[in-house]
Image (cartoon, helix red, strand yellow):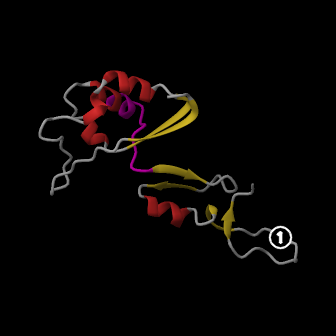
Amino acid sequence: GEEAKIVIITLVRSNVRKDGVPELSDSGSIGFLKSENRTNVLLSRAKHGMYLIGNASLMEKEKHRLWPKVIGELRQYNRVGEGLPIVCKNHPHIENFASTPEMLSTMSPDGGCSEPCNFDMSCGHICPKFCKLSL
């Protein structure tokens, strides 16, 4: 893969028991994510920032020890969280964390945040919609 300024990686493994505890498959494997070469390529594509979206607790249980080391280092620097930080460009003091896709549409209904737009429209009225990002 090519490099990019920001990389968003989804780790699709999320095996969870009925009691909510993450567990590996019967073979103790996390599939293709156990390959050190693939993981190295995966983790080296970001120039400025990277988001890993997945089940950190499950990845820590990987038996080949690469992912436990990666997740451990992320935890050491407080880089593991319960959601994606969402900060409005127009209202940078407003920060939310989206832990589900549905939360994005609630927090950012028109692409900005849930604050009123308050933009002066050409007709003289103030925009009644939510904040939106200007293009």
Answer above or below: position of 118 versus 16.
below
- Indicate the position of residue 53 as horizontal and vertical percent values: 40, 44
Does the magenta run of residues contain 76?
Answer: yes
Looking at the rendering, which quadrant does residue 77 occupy? top left
- The part of the image, by quadrant, that contains residue 118 is bottom right
Q: Residue at x 58, y 66 (%)?
A: 109
Q: How many marks?
A: 1
| Front-most of residues 26 and 105 | 26
Q: Which residues are drawn in magenta?
A: 72-83
| Residue 89 relative to residue 121: left or right | left
Considering depth in this image, is 133 or 78 the residue closer to the camera?
133
Above-or-below relation of 128 to 61? below
Up the image or down, 81 lies above or below 91; here it is above
Residue 39 as seen in the image, left or right of residue 97: left
Q: Nearer the viewer, residue 77 or 8?
A: 8
Q: Position of residue 4 (x, y in %)?
A: 57, 32
Q: Residue at x 33, y 32 (%)?
A: 71
Quadrant holding the C terminus: bottom right
Say left or right for 46 vs 25.
right
Element under disc 1? loop
Residue at left offset 43%, top offset 50% = 83
Badge 1: how crowded within 10 Å, few (<14), some, or many (20+)? few
* Residue for badge 1: 120
Please tell me whether residue 1 is drawn above or below residue 11 in the rendered image: above
Which residue is painted at 58% across and 62% down in the image?
Answer: 108
Where residue 67 sits in the image (x, y, percent)?
Answer: 30, 29
Is 94 covered by the magenta stretch? no
Q: Quadrant of residue 49?
A: top right
The amino acid type of the residue labelled 1 equals Asp
